[in-house]
Image (cartoon, rainbow, N blue to C red):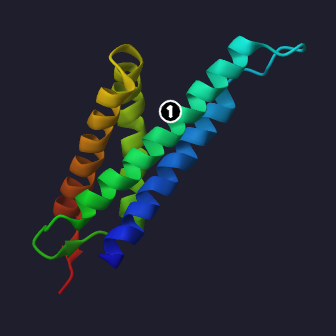
């Protein structure tokens, strides 16, 4: 279980780092007098980032903890899977969360993280024995 937690932390950390870098580079600066709309958009982006980060951690923890014939992935592969998760989440989950709802988007992100962690362990993992 300790290995699954460390892999999930790497998965989540790289994912959050990529999301925060993207948000910092693309989010607009506030107007001079301040704006309520800008503050609402900022709180929406922060809540989406936190929700995707939490879902990424929980989903990858489940995915890495699932039995996969005694295989384990390295921290580097877990981090690469976290980056792939962010790319797929940006393409699929965020538009879904904004159009259908945050709960369904979070569920899809959770299943995506579980699937990526489990399939990544099955494909790129080495024998733990």
Left or right of residue 117, residue 67 in this image: left
Q: Is residue 59 left or right of residue 57?
A: left
**Numbered marks: total:** 1
Residue found 25% across the figure and 59% down from its top: 62
Frontmost residue, 89 versus 37 = 37
Look at mark 1 in the image and give the residue it sits on. 48
Residue in the picture at 51% in, 56% down: 13
Q: Can you say whether 49 is above or below 118 in the image?
A: above
**Depth order, front residue of 62/77:** 62
Residue reaching furthest right? 32
Give the camera-side residue of 65 and 74: 65
Residue at (59, 34) in percent of width and height: 46
Residue 1: % across, % down: 29, 75
| Quarter assignment of residue 90 | top left
Q: Residue at x 89, y 15 (%)?
A: 32
Give SS at disc 1.
Answer: helix
- Judged from this view, the residue extending furthest toward the bottom is 129
Q: Quadrant of residue 2?
A: bottom left
Please state the horizontal and vertical placement of residue 71, each as a whole percent of the image.
18, 73
Residue 76 percent across, percent down from the top left? 42, 65
Q: Is 6 above or below relative to 13?
A: below
Q: Position of residue 54 (x, y in %)?
A: 44, 48
Q: Quadrant of the C terminus?
A: bottom left
Disc 1 packing (10 Å; few <14; some 14–19; many ≥20): some
């Amino acid at each position: 279980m300790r290995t699954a937690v460390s892999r999930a932390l790497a998965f989540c950390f790289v994912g959050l780092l990529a999301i925060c870098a993207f948000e910092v580079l693309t989010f607009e600066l506030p107007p001079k007098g301040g704006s309520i709309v800008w503050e609402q958009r900022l709180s929406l982006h922060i809540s989406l980032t936190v929700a995707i980060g939490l879902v990424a951690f929980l989903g990858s923890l489940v995915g890495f903890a699932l039995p996969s014939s005694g295989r384990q992935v390295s921290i580097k592969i877990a981090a690469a899977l976290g980056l792939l998760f962010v790319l797929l989440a940006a393409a699929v989950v965020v538009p879904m969360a904004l159009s259908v709802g945050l709960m369904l988007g979070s569920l899809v992100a959770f299943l995506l993280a579980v699937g990526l962690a489990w399939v990544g362990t099955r494909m790129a993992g080495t024998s733990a024995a």
